[in-house]
Image (tube, rainbow, N blue to C red):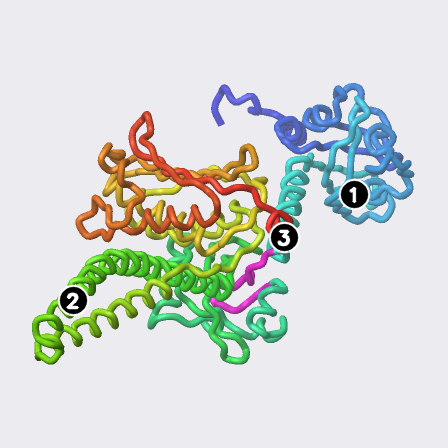
Amino acid sequence: MSDTDPSKGENPADLFRRQRDLILMASGDGIYGIDDRGISTFVNPAAARMSGYSVEEMLGRNLHELVHHSHADGRHFPSVECPIHEATRDGKIHRIYDDVFWRKDGTSFPVEYVSTPIWDDGRIAGAVVSFRDITERKRAEQELRDSEQRYRAMFDGSNAAGFLIDAETCFVLDENKRTCELFGYSEAQLRLLRAEDLFVGAPGEIPAFWRKVQREGAAETETPFAVTAEGERIPVRLSASRIRYANRTGLLVLATDLSVRREIEARAWALQSELHHVSRVSAMGEMASAMAHELNQPLSAVMNYLAAARRLSRTEFDGESRTIQMVEKAISQASRAGEIIRSLRTFLDKGESETEFASPYDVIHDTLPLIEPAVAAAGLSLSCELDPDAPHTLLQRVNIQQVLLNLIRNAAEAMGEQAQGVINVACWSSNDQIWVEVADQGPGLSQAQQAKLFQPFNTSKSDGMGVGLSICHSIISDHDGEICAENRPDGGAVFRFCLPVITPGDRA
């Protein structure tokens, strides 16, 4: 011991008391002592600070009456029921993990404490109380409970099958109702299964998926199938994330049934294919009708010339020559060709398409998903401004869809391979008319193109037939509407058509 050591030559008992006092002063926990009557004999600064009193204000006071007089709900707390005072009666250590002390300003704070009896010559002389403010712990516990409640609400209310698996064993630990419905197992049966029992995929796909979740913390895929209790395979979107529970690692798994979505997608593609087919058939019909019209005139001229030749031949050859026979056969064949052309034109004449009372907004909204993949594949996107309150009218749904698909497809082709290009689609109503607009960011229309825009067999495409816009014009005209096109001031072209608002009563 050095000469400067203040404890040099100090009485051991005094040294012990001084070290004890230093410990009490430095402790972050509140510490105080009471005698067998509950009167405080010492109080450390931390106890005073947490209570809002000074040390002097607490010494010599009944601390139960000062800081422990009431329960958390405000009810009186008799000292005979106080666990702190109980230590002075039964000589046992009492540990309480959830109680409250009261501050000088009348507010309370949550505490945990230990009351340890003090023995002196075989009798209980009092108790030492050590307490800690657990406000932060209580807040953390409440946040955890709130989080668990939100998790449980989300977990149980999810449309996806949700379950928790142990990261080490991969056994199912918890599941929601949808999991039982999807897989066809009871809760008890699921708890006997491991994750790999519930899903199948390509060779090695499922184990690789779980490893990815463990490695990266989360993963998602749409290629696996859920295997039900009956052996049925259901396509699912499988997503999983690594979480902590009970000081262990678990995997939170969500499996979303994709069978309905894929069925809808299949129907959409089927409808799109049907619309493409209708468009091609219509285009071929328009072309054939135009060709029949054009062929009818020279065929009629041929028949007239043959009839004249027949008359001349009969005059010159007395009606018996081989030339007259050939002319007669030519007239017969020409007449037959004319009948075929007339039959073809009759067949190609538009019949009455199925008409319904519908909202153009709904028709357009149902049509856009059919063309979005093709637009996205071209590196473009759709921007829509559709008025959901646009009035209903009598229309031919498939035909209006055909017009919209044709206009959007033309807009995409006009824009070529522009990066980040946008095709704008709008729908609104004005003055008992419903307007639909498709605008592109392409090079616009030349004067020559505008002059013959809706005429058959007019096209600026190297591989085009030039009948698409003619068909659109015909469809809109059949609806008593109008279609037009113009260049935008900021570049590109805009195609716009309108439909009159017609109610079923108007056509009655």
Q: Horizontal and vertical percent for residue 402?
A: 40, 53
Q: In percent of the image, x 52 and y 75: which residue is there?
A: 228
Is residue 164 on the magenta stretch? yes
- Give the quarter of the image for residue 200: bottom left
- Give the quarter of the image for residue 79: top right
Q: Amino acid at mark 1?
A: Pro
Magenta stretch bounds: 158-175
Q: Is residue 417 visible?
A: yes
Q: In percent of the image, x 79 and y 39: which residue is there?
A: 127
- Give the quarter of the image for residue 447: top left
- The residue indicated by pointer 1 is 117
Q: In this rendering, is residue 302 above or below 369?
A: below
- The residue indicated by pointer 3 is 508
| Distance in Å between CA atoms under marks 1 and 2 | 135 Å
The answer to whether 459 appears left or right of 374 in the picture is left
Q: In percent of the image, x 33 and y 48: which residue is there?
A: 470
- The residue indicated by pointer 2 is 306
Of the pair 255 and 372, the residue shown nearer to us: 372
Tell me the SS state at disc 1: strand
Tell me the SS state at disc 3: loop
Q: Amino acid at mark 3?
A: Ala
Q: In this rendering, is residue 346 above or below 330?
A: above
